[in-house]
Image (cartoon, helix red, strand yellow):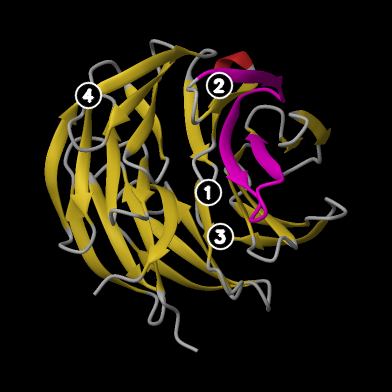
Amino acid sequence: MASTESIFVLSQDDGILSVIDTRADEIAAKITIGGKPAAFAIDRTSGKAFATLPDKGEIVVIDLAQRSAVSTLKVGGQPFGIASDGAGRLFVGDWSANRISVVDENSGGVEKTLSVGRSPAHLVAARDGSRVYVADRESNTVAVIDGRSLKILSEVPVGRAPFALALTPDQTQLVVANVQAATLSIIDTATMKVVASPATGPMPYGVAVTQDNSEILVSNQHGGTVSILDAQTRLPRAEIKVGRYPEGVAVLRDGRKAYVANWFSGSVSVIDLKADAEIKKIKCPEGPRMVLVGAAQR
């Protein structure tokens, strides 16, 4: 069956969001953002994407159906990581001010600011928006925010330099990639405790979990590889060579393929998860660093 999903790739150096058709594994559209975008989030309710521009203190609003940037939200500071709660609010990390701003995605108004650890990197929101998780890179912690009361519930100690985050499909565990520790921290979201810390390759910069919760994928930046771990035993079962300095990872819902952003190679590797092999490299605008999966675009 043909995939009904697209892969969205954020290229920092060229300031472009590319849309990959996962049936042909080719770029179907390129959306100009400008600047040097650091991260983006998709609101699956509104069909919009939001890309942060740390150097300008702005968030670019992108209409994915129109395939164009439509407006800019001026939030100030150094916005880096971002997550959408699916109900019209954005949670935006300010890298230099060590805070999270809760922003109305339509007006850009700030509802509240929350102090977190140093250098908040990537954020991820629970599917129902009830929680938001923040990787505080220089504090070696993950902040847990109640998405309803907008209060900090916990600061969970993890490994050195946490950066990328992924929730398991059942939302019961959060997987954290600790860049300098070369480990994952797996957090039980009910107890907010680390239950496992498996080793990875050197400099893990991206992480994803398959929809059936059977496998964890980790990009090893300094190894130029993607490791596949059994999600139950947390033991590695495969390592796949990709491009130079791989970072973001995304997996299709049917579990057939994964996509990896190769920052220094200017490409996205397509991985066949049944064969455990790279089957294609897709040339992208320069500096691809983050990938997300979303609904297919016409």
- The disc at residue 127 is 1
116 w.r.t. 73: above or below: above
Relative horizontal placement of residue 113, taking residue 171 as reference (left or right): left
Q: Secondary structure at mark 1?
A: loop
| Magenta highlight on residue 212 | no
The residue under the point 35% across, 34% down is 90
Up the image or down, 85 lies above or below 282; here it is: above
Q: Earlier in the sequence, mark 2 or mark 4?
A: 4
Q: Going 46% across and 52% down the picture, which residue do you hit?
A: 262
Give the image location of residue 214, x and y in percent. 75, 63
Q: What amino acid is at disc 4?
A: Gly
Q: Which residues are magenta?
A: 151-177
Q: Which residue is mark 2?
A: 136
Q: Are marks 2 and 3 in contact (CB under 8 Å)?
A: no
Q: Which mark is residue 53?
A: none
Query: Residue 207 location in percent, x, y?
Result: 60, 47
Q: Residue at x 23, y 50 (%)?
A: 16
- Relative horizontal placement of residue 295, taking residue 206 as reference (left or right): left
- The reply to whether callout 2 and callout 1 are in contact (CB within 8 Å) is no
User: In screen coordinates, is 187 left or right of 118?
Assistant: right
Q: Nearer the viewer, mark 2 or mark 3?
A: 2
